[in-house]
Image: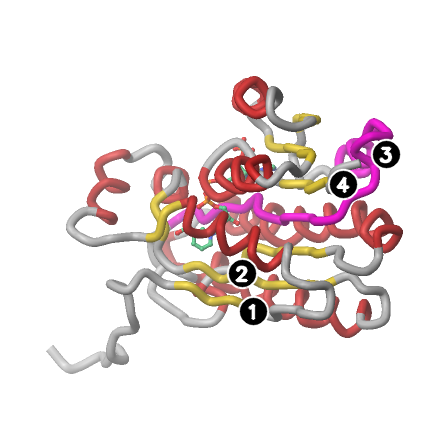
Amino acid sequence: MSNVVFITGATSGFGRATARRFAEAGWSLVLTGRRSERLEELKAELGAKVPVHIATLDVRDAEAVKKAVADLPAEFAQIKALINNAGLALAPQPSQNVDLTDWHTMIDTNITGLVNVTHAVLPKLLETGKGASIVNLGSVAGEWPYPGGHVYGASKAFVKQFSFNLRCDLIATGVRVTDIAPGMAETEFTLVRTRGDQAASDKLYQGTTPLTAEDIAEQIYYVATLPDHININRLEIMPSRQAWSPFAVDRDK
Ligand SMILES: NC(=O)c1ccc[n+]([C@@H]2O[C@H](COP(=O)([O-])OP(=O)(O)OC[C@H]3O[C@@H](n4cnc5c(N)ncnc54)[C@H](OP(=O)(O)O)[C@@H]3O)[C@@H](O)[C@H]2O)c1
């Protein structure tokens, strides 16, 4: 039987590229996300190559997550890799101008959602044991502050620390845990963050060379297929054309 990978947020960006990367290597796919038609499209694309199971799922709904895992067909029930990728940033404006609901949505998705899926899938990974992996999508925003990063960056700092703490508990189980922390990557991420402002999204990536979804998918595949005795704790990846800036200083006008 082929290895099974369970991917959240497979309808776009890193998640979709990761589904394609694992399919190329012959893995069976469990693909989840809220947009059913995108899941159907991906199943139609990859289903001829490898077994594909799709489940329309909002990671914020703990009961639905539990049910999706409990309802996995036997062929997909032995999971070797969990890719906790579903996530989003909202509200690029400063904290003082943000709607509380946007902060809640980021916490509910990036923290609560990731925890829901991890809790539901962990027993399956423990059954697999040696060589199983949890790959969590963190961000450079989890390590480095920037204006407008507020709850998004804080939620990704949670992802990093949760990943490290999981490692401590799972040390003797064979289940590996990695926090992958990308920098600027062109996906639908900025379109979501700006609530569908295509011009703003294009402008952010214009005149530079951002990471692609495929770049990150390759790294996800790499960490999940290393020899069993290797655990990459954290992988922070920026485009060559992105780096840090000097500290901001407020001066008298
Ligand atoms: N692009 C970047 O610059 C960047 C950098 C660092 C980290 N990241 C992180 O990488 C991950 C993937 O982002 P991306 O760049 O690939 O963005 P994307 O193209 O917008 O994809 C995000 C995915 O998350 C899913 N998702 C969002 N909310 C969900 C929910 N409540 N339940 C289930 N699925 C949900 C979306 O699917 P549905 O809408 O169909 O549910 C979509 O498939 C995120 O965790 C993001 O924070 C991105």
Please state which amino acid type lies under the numbered disc 1.
Arg
Of callouts 4 and 2, the N-terminal one = 4
Q: Nearer the viewer, mark 3 or mark 4?
A: 3
Q: Which residue is farthest left?
A: 253
Q: Which residue is mark 2?
A: 180
Mark carried by residue 62? 4
Give yes or no for contact between labels 2 and 1 (Cβ–Cβ under 8 Å): yes
Mark pair 3, 4: CA separation: 12 Å
**Residue 120 in picture, x, y percent from top left:** 81, 46
Which of these two is toward me, 189 or 3? 3
Q: The magenta stretch spans which residues?
A: 62-91
Q: Which residue is mark 3?
A: 70
Give yes or no for contact between labels 1 and 3 (Cβ–Cβ under 8 Å): no
Of callouts 4 and 1, the N-terminal one = 4
Q: Residue at x 33, y 64 (%)?
A: 147
Quarter of the figure with the C terminus: bottom left
Using the image, determine if residue 247 lies above or below residue 171. below
Q: Nearer the viewer, mark 4 or mark 2?
A: 2
Of callouts 2 and 3, the N-terminal one = 3
Which of these two is toward me, 227 or 153? 227
**Residue 40 in picture, x, y percent from top left:** 58, 19
Instruction: Give the side of residue 201 with respect to residue 129, left or right.
Output: left
Mark 3: which secondary structure? helix
